[in-house]
Image (cartoon, rainbow, N blue to C red):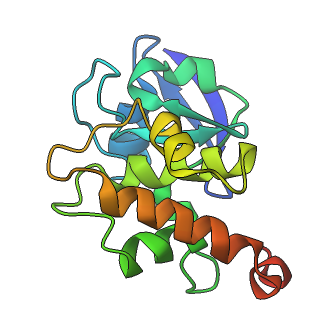
Amino acid sequence: MARVSMTVDGTNYVDEVEPRTLLVHHLRERLGKVGTLIGCDTSNCGACTVNLDGVSVKSCSVLAVQADGADITTVEGLARDGELHPVQKAFHENHGLQCGFCTPGMIMQSIDLLGENPDPSEEEVRYGLEGNLCRCTGYQNIVASVRAAAEAMQSPTATQAGA
């Protein structure tokens, strides 16, 4: 067993893990972060995407021991004071989901994309979400959601709210 310490959604955790434990399994099974979904276990779908020290990663391709000392944000840690994150809100308002299975990963990857490019074109959104798969849609509403979130996050009220 290996001892790991990490901050997940603002809470510090210290735990003993098997060295071969994937981060996605640690988040879901030990920490109860079931919003981080397991879609493929091969890093092909992106459903398990989380933010690790400021960068989106597919948590099925990271060992929990590799995240020792890290600051991790899951989809469950995005809302503040009962208010959805602007990307979560945009996905809701623009119907950026169908069955919802890919949505947590899409949202987490979208936040990373918007952090790098606050005003992406449709083509840049599609490229930025390339490693996240949705099996239900043609991505139109997902792209619209990301673009709406970009617009909302650039508005003065979003800036004042700390989005």
- Front residue of 127/93: it is 127
> Would residue 4 appear left or right of 33 to someone viewing this image?
right
**Rendering coords of residue 70 (x, y %):** 70, 34
- Tell me if residue 146 can be seen: yes
Is the residue 102 above or below the residue 58 in the image?
below
Image quadrant of residue 143?
bottom left
- Front residue of 118/71: it is 118
Residue drawn 45% across the image and 29% down it: 58
Is the residue 157 above or below the residue 118 in the image?
below
- Front residue of 143/111: it is 143
> Would residue 66 appear left or right of 70 to someone viewing this image?
left
Residue drawn 48% across the image and 70% down it: 88
Is the residue 136 above or below the residue 15 in the image?
below
> Would residue 113 appear left or right of 128 to someone viewing this image?
right
**Rendering coords of residue 128 (x, y %):** 53, 37
Residue drawn 47% across the image and 55% down it: 107
**Rendering coords of residue 14 (x, y %):** 62, 38
Image quadrant of residue 116?
top right
Total label count?
A: 0
- Front residue of 138/82: it is 138
- Tell me if residue 12 can be seen: no
Residue drawn 41% across the image and 69% down it: 91
Give the quarter of the figure containing the C terminus: bottom right
